[in-house]
């Protein structure tokens, strides 16, 4: 019995889909899972987290929570001495991300309560540090109880949860990521607009030039694909630095030296140069698919050139424009190397912060949350593109 064409197609594509799942989707999904996963504190302080389950978060908890904290810290110290993987240090690092000071507070308390003491645990713990009398200290422990947590996602949105569970905006002087996201969107829009303005006449020239000249122009657009992005960015560093080629030429004219690097101008200029081919190629395809008889027919009917462009040429080229804009915008939104090498501190985009928290501060949860924020932004852009481009499902009217 012969397999149906649909089943045969599914069997042929199954190896490729399996490869993509194992090498692409699964690693990215595992990384993004860290944005909501919270497992560092619960193995160290299980009794404390259980004791805080019914706590109202308004004032420091009762004696039971303090006694549970002492038991947990003593047990964790024994595990660490027996060859554990530093559970107290990991828990302190996670809690410190929520409430600074925990990196020293938790290990110090663990050392002090290890020796037996008389009297209530509350008095003994408060004698070690008055911070244990603050409700926010205990709120940080409860928020880290896991196994799932909204802490990193809220932090990526410049929000935080207080001890009582209410979500509030962080103080204005501590807001970072909202500004970074707005900056990333603005730079991406600026680069997309510049690529469209420069790519339109170049694509029109390529599409209307016949013979070897058109092939040569198209090859010049494709040539940057064969050169590494890092190499192209480094070339702009050579051109724009204070003693670079551009400032040397301006110096010969009695101008400068000008600050052409470590600013927004250098970032946008290099990004436009790198991403321009992604705008030109869809436009060339759109222009070559345009029937030249239609603009001529409109002109023969008395329409002036501007009306021919607005009513005939532009609507027919909109799919190519939309494709080029979405390609450039999405790639610009995730740029990392070029802003890092050519921009200043106020020019870094969201991808730079993902790299910073993943490699330098080793805060994988926040790095994953910022990546999730970037993924949502890209998803919104793709949805808007589908809406504006008039995508339809097969068979839809």
Image (tube, rainbow, N blue to C red):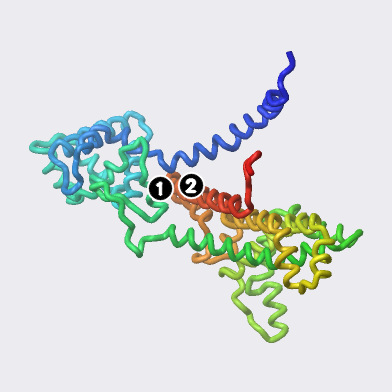
**Residue 314 - label:** none
Residue in view at x 27 percent, y 31 percent: 78
Between 354 and 244, which is closer to the camera in this rendering? 354
Residue in view at x 74 percent, y 68 percent: 309
Q: Residues within 10 Å of mark 2 (few under 14, many from 20)?
A: some
Above or below 370: residue 1: above
Image position, residue 11 (x, y; %): 68, 24
Q: Quadrant of residue 397?
A: top right
**Residue 372 - label:** 2
- Residue farthest to the bottom, as pictured: 254
Side of 175 relative to 75 (left or right)? right
Q: Quadrant of residue 247?
A: bottom right
Between 76 and 255, which is closer to the camera in this rendering? 255
Between 54 and 231, which is closer to the camera in this rendering? 54
Side of 297 relative to 179 (left or right)? right
- Secondary structure found at label 1: helix
Residue in view at x 33 percent, y 48 percent: 96
Task: Determine whether label 1 and label 2 are within 8 Å by CB.
Answer: yes
Marks 1 and 2, the one that precedes in the sequence: 1
Residue in view at x 68 percent, y 29 percent: 13
Above or below 45: residue 378: below
Quarter of the image where the N terminus is located: top right
| Residue ID for mark 1 | 153
- Residue farthest to the front, as pictured: 301
Image position, residue 35 (x, y; %): 43, 43
Image position, residue 80 (x, y; %): 32, 33
State whether residue 114 appears in this view.
no
Image position, residue 73 (x, y; %): 24, 36
Q: Residues within 10 Å of mark 1 (few under 14, many from 20)?
A: many
Above or below 84: residue 129: below
């Amino acid at each position: 019995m012969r397999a149906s064409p649909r089943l045969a197609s599914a069997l042929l594509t199954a190896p490729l889909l399996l490869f993509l799942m194992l090498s692409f989707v699964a690693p990215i999904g595992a990384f993004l899972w860290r944005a909501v996963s919270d497992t560092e504190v619960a193995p160290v302080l299980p009794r404390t987290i259980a004791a805080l389950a019914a706590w109202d978060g308004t004032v420091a908890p009762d004696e039971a929570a303090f006694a549970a904290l002492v038991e947990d810290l003593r047990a964790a110290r024994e595990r660490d001495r027996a060859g554990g993987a530093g559970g107290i240090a990991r828990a302190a690092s996670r809690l410190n991300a929520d409430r600074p000071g925990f990196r020293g507070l938790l290990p110090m308390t663990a050392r002090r309560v290890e020796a037996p003491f008389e009297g209530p645990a509350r008095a003994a713990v408060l004698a070690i540090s008055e911070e244990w009398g603050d409700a926010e200290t205990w709120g940080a422990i409860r928020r880290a109880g896991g196994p799932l947590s909204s802490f990193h996602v809220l932090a990526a949105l410049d929000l935080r949860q207080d001890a009582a569970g209410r979500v509030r905006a962080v103080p204005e002087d501590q807001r970072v990521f909202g500004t970074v996201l707005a900056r990333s969107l603005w730079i991406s829009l600026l680069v997309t607009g510049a690529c469209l303005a420069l790519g339109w006449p170049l694509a029109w020239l390529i599409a209307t030039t016949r013979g070897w000249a058109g092939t040569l122009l198209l090859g010049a657009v494709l040539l940057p694909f064969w050169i590494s992005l890092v190499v192209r960015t480094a070339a702009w560093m050579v051109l724009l630095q204070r003693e670079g080629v551009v400032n040397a030429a301006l110096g010969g004219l009695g101008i400068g030296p000008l600050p052409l690097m470590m600013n927004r101008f250098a970032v946008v200029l290099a990004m436009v140069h790198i991403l321009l081919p992604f705008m030109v190629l869809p436009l060339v395809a759109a222009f070559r698919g345009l029937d030249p008889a239609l603009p001529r027919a409109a002109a023969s009917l008395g329409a002036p050139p501007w009306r021919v462009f607005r009513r005939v040429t532009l609507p027919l080229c909109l799919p190519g424009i939309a494709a080029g804009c979405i390609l450039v915008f999405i790639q610009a939104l995730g740029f990392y190397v070029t802003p890092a090498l050519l921009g200043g501190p106020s020019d870094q985009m969201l991808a730079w912060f993902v790299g910073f928290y993943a490699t330098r501060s080793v805060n994988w949860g926040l790095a994953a949350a910022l990546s999730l924020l970037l993924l949502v932004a890209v998803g919104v852009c793709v949805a808007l593109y589908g809406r504006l481009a008039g995508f339809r499902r097969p068979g839809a009217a």
